[in-house]
Image (cartoon, grey):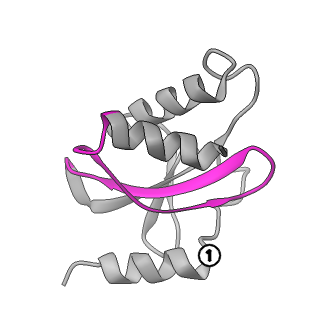
Amino acid sequence: MDLAEHIIREIDRSWADEVNILGYWEDGPATVCVVYCRTIDPAVVLGRRLVFNSTAADGTIEGFARDVAINMAEPIGRATSRPDQHGVVWVGVSKDRRIPEPPSEVLQILRNNEPG
């Protein structure tokens, strides 16, 4: 099972009432980008670029996925955030890193998810 599947499974198990995954894609080895919204602020589309390594969480992919799911359900607080040209607010992407570019199928989902 890959990183995205672990994260999606953890959200479905514990946070489905709070987090709605709109799309995800691989962005390198052990790296996945997730675009989602939360029920507490459904008009805001958030994105995260998540990189698993053996020092993350408890060192397991399952522990990492649990931590990510919790973080996605919580307010972003003071985390660094930057919007992209598609209306996604990327959380935790520092200014010296590129903002991930969603693939066309995720962009289509975002267009279909726009209010109005």
Query: Does 35 lie within the magenta span?
Result: yes
The residue at which mark 1 appears reads as 103
Q: Hey, which quadrant is residue 46 in on the image?
A: bottom left
Residue visible at 42% across and 71% down? 87
Mark 1, other Cα within 10 Å: few <14 / some 14–19 / many ≥20: few
Query: Does 37 lie within the magenta span?
Result: yes
Residue visible at 71% across and 59% down? 98
Residue visible at 64% across and 70% down? 101
Residue visible at 46% across and 83% down? 108
- Residue found farthest to the right: 29
Specify whether residue 74 is in view. no
Q: Is residue 18 left or right of residue 97?
A: left
Looking at this view, is 52 or 114 the one in front? 52
Give x and y (percent) for residue 60.
Answer: 66, 22
Give x and y (percent) for residue 88.
Answer: 45, 65
- Residue found farthest to the top: 58
Relative to residue 51, is residue 99 depicted above or below? below
Relative to residue 29, is residue 42 depicted above or below? below
Magenta range:
14-40
Q: Is residue 88 left or right of residue 58?
A: left
Give x and y (percent) for residue 15.
Answer: 31, 38
Q: Amino acid at mark 1?
A: Pro
Looking at this view, is 61 or 69 the one in front? 61
Relative to residue 49, is residue 78 depicted above or below? above
**Element marked by disc 1:** loop
Q: Hey, which quadrant is residue 70 in on the image?
A: top left
